[in-house]
Amino acid sequence: MASFDIVNKVDMQLLDNAVNTTKKEIQNRYDFRDSKTEIELDKNGLKIQLTTDNSMRIKTIEDVLLTRAVKQNIDGKCFDFTQEDYQSGALVKKEIKIKQGIEKETAKKIVKLIKDLKLKVEPAIMDEQVRVSGKKLDELQHVIHALRNANLEIPVQFINMKS
């Protein structure tokens, strides 16, 4: 029986490359000259800490980071920019969270989407991923195509394809 897993994972090496490229670009930009700007990636806490002089620069750093991440093939939906920046002395700080894993509610939506296709496949929620099994490889590929075109609030990857 053929199967594959639907997951939401960010490759930490690619993310590290995007953060390092952002640091280099910020250091070379004229509008950031003589500013106290720092970008730190916390791989264990799944967050990026931005520190700079004012909130306008925070927005610029976010744009540069998002651009660099997309160039590294990291989906922009994995970043949570919703947290407000806050003042810490003379500096402005912001924490960007990295979303990984599929939450139960989102997994249920994915399962419902798959069942609405009315194919002979069986989706199953397993921890933070969804496994889809079926007899025909064509039907599994149809599920992948349908999920890529669906407007999900998280980026999804399809791994462990077994036939």
Image (cartoon, rainbow, N blue to C red):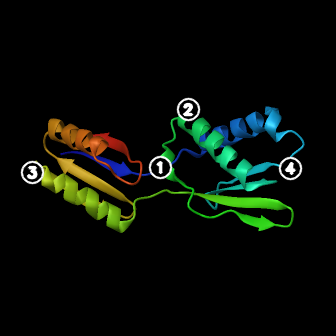
The three-letter code of the residue at mark 1 reads Lys
Q: Of the residues under marks 3 and 4, which one precedes in the sequence?
A: 4
Front residue of 154/132: it is 154
Q: What percent of the width, then of the height, locates residue 155?
A: 41, 48
C-alpha span from label 1 to label 2: 14 Å
Q: Nearer the viewer, mark 4 or mark 2?
A: 4
Q: What percent of the width, then of the height, locates residue 129?
A: 36, 57
Q: What percent of the width, then of the height, locates residue 156?
A: 38, 48
C-alpha span from label 3 to label 4: 56 Å
| Residue extending furthest toward the right | 34
Front residue of 126/74: it is 74
Which label is found at residue 77?
Answer: 1
Q: Of the residues under marks 4 and 2, which one precedes in the sequence?
A: 4
C-alpha span from label 1 to label 3: 28 Å
Write the residue at 52% across / 47% down.
Answer: 10
Mark 3 nearby-residue class (10 Å; few <14, some 14–19, many ≥20) = few
Question: Does residue 122 appear to the left or right of 40 in the view shown?
Answer: left
Question: Which residue is the site of mark 4?
Answer: 36
Front residue of 152/88: it is 88
Question: Does residue 39 appear to the left or right of 35 in the view shown?
Answer: left
Question: Does the rendering let one see residue 29?
Answer: yes
Question: Which residue is the site of mark 3?
Answer: 118
